[in-house]
Amino acid sequence: MTAEAKQACADLLAEYAYLIDADRLEDWLDLFVEESTYQIVPRENYVRGLPLQLMLCENKNMLRDRVVSLRQANIYNIHVDRHLVSSVRYLGEESGVHSVGANYAVFQTDQDGQSRLFSVGEYIDSIVVEDGAFKFKDKLVIADTSSIPTLLATPL
Amino acid sequence: MRNEAEYVWPTSDFTRIPFGIYHDADVYEQEMHKVFRGPTWSYLCFDVEIPNPGDFKCVNIGDTPVVVNRDKDGSFHAFINRCAHRGSIVRREEFGNAKDHTCVYHQWCYSLKGDLLGVPFQRGVKGKGGMPKDFDVANHGLQTLRVENFNGVIFASFSDDAPPLEDFLDEPICKHLKRLTHKKVKVLGYQRQYIHGNWKLYTDNTRDPNHGGLLHPFQVTFGIARLTHGGGAVLDKRGCHNISMVEGDSDSEEDASKAYEDSGSGAYMTDYSLHDTSMLATQKEFGDEITLSIMSIFPNVVFQQIGNCLATRQIRCKGVDAFELYWTYYGYEDDDAEMTAHRLRQANMAGPGGLISMEDGEAVEIVHRAIKREHDKHSVAEYGGRGEIKTQDTLITEVPMRGFWAYYCQLMGIDANGAAA
Ligand code: FES
Ligand SMILES: [Fe+2]
C-alpha cells in the first residue's frame, strides 16, 4: 500500500506540474478537493514566522477565482512555464492524509525564446483520496526566490 | 550617454518627459547623489521592526546599503553599511540584534551610533606593526545619516541641507501618514518584486491615478477603484508627493458600467463574477469614506491602503535598468485574529502577485523596453490638463506625475522652465 500511495502522490505532483505548464489551469483545479487550501509563501517570511503570503487561497473557490481572474482580468508577461519537480519525499500517512515534500524549479520562457529561472523552492503537501483519486487537500509552496522577477501570475 | 542638462524638455510644465532620462547611466549616477543623497528624506522602515535596543535592519537608499538600528536609549541611528577601513559590508544579516557591529574582514568594531570603538592589534605586537601612533579612532567612524521618527515611521537623510522632516513631507502627507499610523503598527510580512525597468517609471506609475481604472480590470469590475468613483489626488506644496484617494462607494454599478462602455474601455467586465467575495468586504477603519489610497512620498516610498490591506513599497534601485520593490505589509497591534486574516486575504490584491497590482510590473517593463532607443522622443502627460501643478479633484489625471518631475529637475539642476512652452 505504501509503495502505491507513494507512486500515486508522485504521479499527482507530475500531473500538477504538467497541467500548469500546458496552461490547462481549469483542469489543474480538478487536482484539488473542495475543502482545500493553496498558499505561496516567501521563505523569508516562513522562517521568521510572519504570516504574509504571496498568494492565499483559503478554499477551492478562491483558487477558481485566481484562474478566472488570470483568464479574464489580469494582464501579465506573456510566457511559458516549465516545472522541474524532484526529490519527492513521501513522509507517511495519518488518518487518510498523506504528507509529501518535494523541490521545484520553475523556468519561464518569453516570446523571444529566452528562458530564465523564475522561482525555486519546495512543496509541502497534504494529499487525500477522493473517489479513488489522489488529490491535494493543502498545498504550501515555499519560494526560496523571495524576490519575484517581474510579477507572479501563474501558480508555482 | 550624455549630460542630463542636454535633454530637451519641450514644455516648461513637464507635460513632456524625454525618454532618455530613464535610460541614461550618467543620469542615474547623478540621481544617486542629487536625489537620494540630496536635501531629501528617504523612508527606511517602521520603528516596530526593530523594537529592542541593539535591533538592526539592513535597507537601501537608492542603491546605497544602509543599516538602521536602535540604541540602548531607544533612539535610532542609521549609517552606510560600509566599513571605514577597506570598504567591506559591515552588517551582512538582513535583521538581527547586536551590541556592536564588527566587520568580519579585519574586525574593526563600531558602536550602535556608528563610532569606531577599536581596531585589533592597533599597537602591533612587541613594538612591531600595527597602526601609526597618531591613528585616532574618532576620525574613522561609519558614515552616519540624519534620522527622524514620524509616528513610528523612520526616515533618514544624507544631507545637512534637508529641511526638517515635517517640512519636507508637508501638511497633507503628515496628515495622511498619521491617519495610516493612528495605532501601533504590527508587521505581517514582506514581499519583493524585481522589476526590469528604471525606478522613475514606477514613481510615474503611482502618480498616475488614471491608469488604475484602465490597466487593472479586476479593480474596475469589482468596484475597488474606477474612474467613475469620487476622489482625486492631494499634492504637497512642492507637488513632489501626492495622495491619490478613491471613495469606493461613490458610484453605482449602472453608471460605472455605462461610463466605461461609452468611453470604449473594456475594463469594466459585466459577465464576470467571483465565487468567493470575502476579499471585497472592506471595513471602513479610518472614520472616513476613503477605501483606497496610494500615497507616493518622494523619492523612495509608497504607502498603500487597498481596502484594509496596508503596506509600504520601498523602491530600491538596482542600476539604471532595474529596481526592487520591497513591500512591508502591516496591520495594527490591536487587530484580532479575524482582522489579521482579513488583511492577509486582501493581500491577494497587492504585491507581485496581486490581482490589482501585478499589471504594474508588466507596464513598467514594456515601457522600459520600448523607449530604449528613443532618447529624443517624449512621453505625453496631459490628462488633467496643462499648466499649473496642483491638487486634483478627479482620478483622470497625470498632474501628480508632473509634480514629481518639477521637483526632480530642481534637485538635478535641470532647467526645463526655459523650454518653449
Ligand atoms: S574592511 Fe572592515 S575591518 Fe577591514
Ligand atoms: Fe497600478
Image (cartoon, helix red, strand yellow):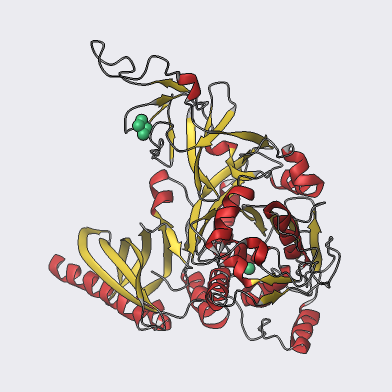
* Labels in figure, total: 0
Say which quarter of the image contains residue B376. Answer: bottom right
- In screen coordinates, is B178 left or right of B107? right
Between residue A116 and residue B342, name the one nearer to us: A116
- Asked if residue B15 can be seen in this view, the reply is yes
- Asked if residue B341 can be seen in this view, the reply is no
Question: For the C terminus of chain B, which image quadrant?
Answer: bottom right
Question: For the N terminus of chain B, which image quadrant?
Answer: bottom right
Q: Residue at x 76, y 78 (%)?
A: B253
Q: Position of residue B212 (x, y in %)?
A: 68, 71
Say which quarter of the image contains residue B38. Answer: top right
Asked if A100 appears above or below B143 in the picture, the reply is below
Asked if B113 appears above or below B41 in the picture, the reply is above
Q: Residue at x 55, y 65 (%)?
A: B24
Q: Quadrant of ligand 1?
A: top left
Between residue B302 and residue B333, name the one nearer to us: B302
Q: Residue at x 54, y 32 (%)?
A: B51
Q: Position of residue B209 (x, y in %)?
A: 72, 68
- In screen coordinates, is B114 left or right of B76? left
Outermost residue to the top? B126
Q: Position of residue A10 (x, y in %)?
A: 22, 71
Q: Position of residue A52 (x, y in %)?
A: 49, 53
Asked if A44 appears above or below A83 in the picture, the reply is above
